[in-house]
Amino acid sequence: MADEQGQQDKPNIVLILADDLGYGDVQCLNPKWGKIPTPNIDRLAAQGMTFTDAHSNSSVCTPTRYGLLTGRYSWRTRLQEGVLPNTRQPLIAKDRLTLAGMFKKLGYDTGAVGKWHLGWNCRYKADGSLDPTQPIGEGPITRGFDWYFGTLFDPGCFMENDRLIGAESLIRAEKGKCAFARTAVPDWQDEDMLPTFTNKAREYIRRQAGKKRPFFLYLAMTSPHWPIVPTPQWRGKSGLGAYGDFVMETDAMVGRDLAAVEETGIADNTLVLFTSDNGCTPGHNVASGMEKQGHYPSANMRGHKSDAWDGGHRIPLMVRWPGMVKPGSACGQLVCLNDLMATFAAATDFALPHDAAEDSVNFLSLLQGGHQPTRSALVHHSIAGKFAIRDGQWKLILCPGSGGWSAPKDAATRKQKRPAVQLFNMDADIGERQNLQAQHPEIVQRLTAELRQIVEDGRSTPGPKQKNDAAVDIFKKRQ
């Protein structure tokens, strides 16, 4: 991938994905209600473009990662609510083109560091416990990545490519166990994950910097997600508890990653993107505890991680691309993490096949300073599998409550005889407080029909119809 003078002709790409970082946790996005300093993320924003209406395709982890890496809504798969237990079978099909696979076809070296959470093919002993001596199959290195360093999360140990590190001494880890049931190698410390992943990412950047071959690095941080474990250096720094401290440490690690790009002299030909997989968690009283102290992790939006309201899935998104993206610029157009695949394909002249990136919309024109919308509609999805659709100023939610963990939950709202759906004018009511479904039944009908069509077509972009992996019911009746 070099021109006649031996210079690389395609940009390196560093994609940093935080875990459970709320839109309002970034200082420059929330100057009025944000009390956590984030100088490094703010600096990245000042050096590039900030998107103020960017969304993950889901308000929880696994489906967002699926959408980011495939350009396809996760609810088209077997996973139509919740997240995938770490040791379950892979969610991304073997024959599906991924973002990393696309870059590999373009001649890139592809590396992944951190959290995967998209399933593995683990080997088990006769008693049902994990066999740590066997490779962990069907992970990142089988889905387009040349190299991976991360963690299985359960059990607590690091892994490289498909091998657990120091796993010979692991205690019992039962097949299918959920992500939060912890077993670990001796001396394992959760607080070591974030700095270790930062160091591995920096090492990868330094390895690749001297080569003429471009690289794609996917750095999926484990912070500030639970377990909330800032290192001693950062404890007490925020004045907002462990979560605030962890956000500050996360920002510092982003700064170290940016420094690696700059110190190696590749910044001018490297696109750096920073974002998050969903909103801040309401669990462990994280959000409510900080709100009492004046910090609002969802800024002026309603809801948090898990919810259909925007606090669940509107996320930070900053893109720095020297010579292409104007420093200090902002974009208020609707975009989604699903869109990265089509956008990067356009930026690298890759022709996507018709059966890939079915829900990915190219927003390269926005990065280049355009102002016309690139995406007309976006489907949102909550942890309980509740659907919402946004089209222009209108947002329709097909449940009566949050669709997630926040109050009021759907069961409570049904007992109160509230309307079965919610319709909001997002231009006038970003806090989603005034339900207009009774005043605009024609809009409810139009958006419902639009959502049905997106489901039935197996895609939301132009092209031949595709099949969903499983039947999809947009009106879930689950309490």
Image: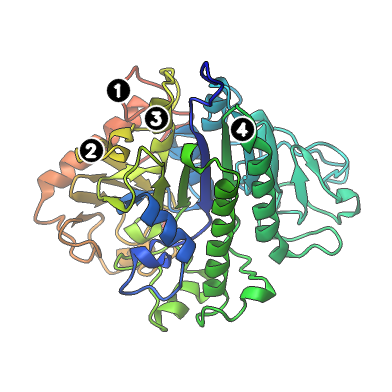
For the residues labelled 3 and 4, the Cα–Cα distance comes to 18 Å
Nearest to N terminus: mark 4 or mark 1: 4
Residue type pointed to by label 3: Ala
| Point 53% across, 56% down: residue | 19
Judging depth in this view, the residue of 44 and 303 nearest the camera is 44
At label 2, counting other C-alpha atoms closer than 10 Å, the crowd grade (few under 14, some 14-19, many 20 or more) is few
Q: Earlier in the sequence, mark 3 or mark 4?
A: 4
Of circles 1 and 2, which is in front?
2
Depth order, front residue of 59/141: 141
Kindly report which numbered mark, 4 or 1, lies closer to the viewer in this rendering.
4
Q: Amino acid at mark 1?
A: Pro
Would residue 23 be visible to someone looking at this image? yes
Where the N terminus falls, by quadrant?
A: top right
For label 1, the crowd category at 10 Å Cα-Cα, with few meaning under 14, some 14 to 19 and many 20 or more, is: few
Whole-percent x, y for residue 22 in the image: 43, 62
Residue located at (78% from left, 59% from top): 183
Tell me which numbered mark, 3 or 1, is placed earlier along the sequence. Answer: 3
| Residue drawn at (43%, 31%) of the image | 344
Spatial distance from mark 2 to mark 4, Cα to Cα? 30 Å
Q: Residue type at mark 2? A: Gly
**Labels 3 and 1 touching (C-beta < 8 A):** no
Q: Residue 257: percent from the left, percent from the top?
A: 58, 52
Residue that carries the numbered disc 4 in the rendered image: 110
In the picture of the structure, the residue carrying the numbered disc 2 is 370
Tell me which label, 2 or 4, sits earlier in the chain: 4
Q: Can you say whether 105 is above or below 403 in the image?
A: above
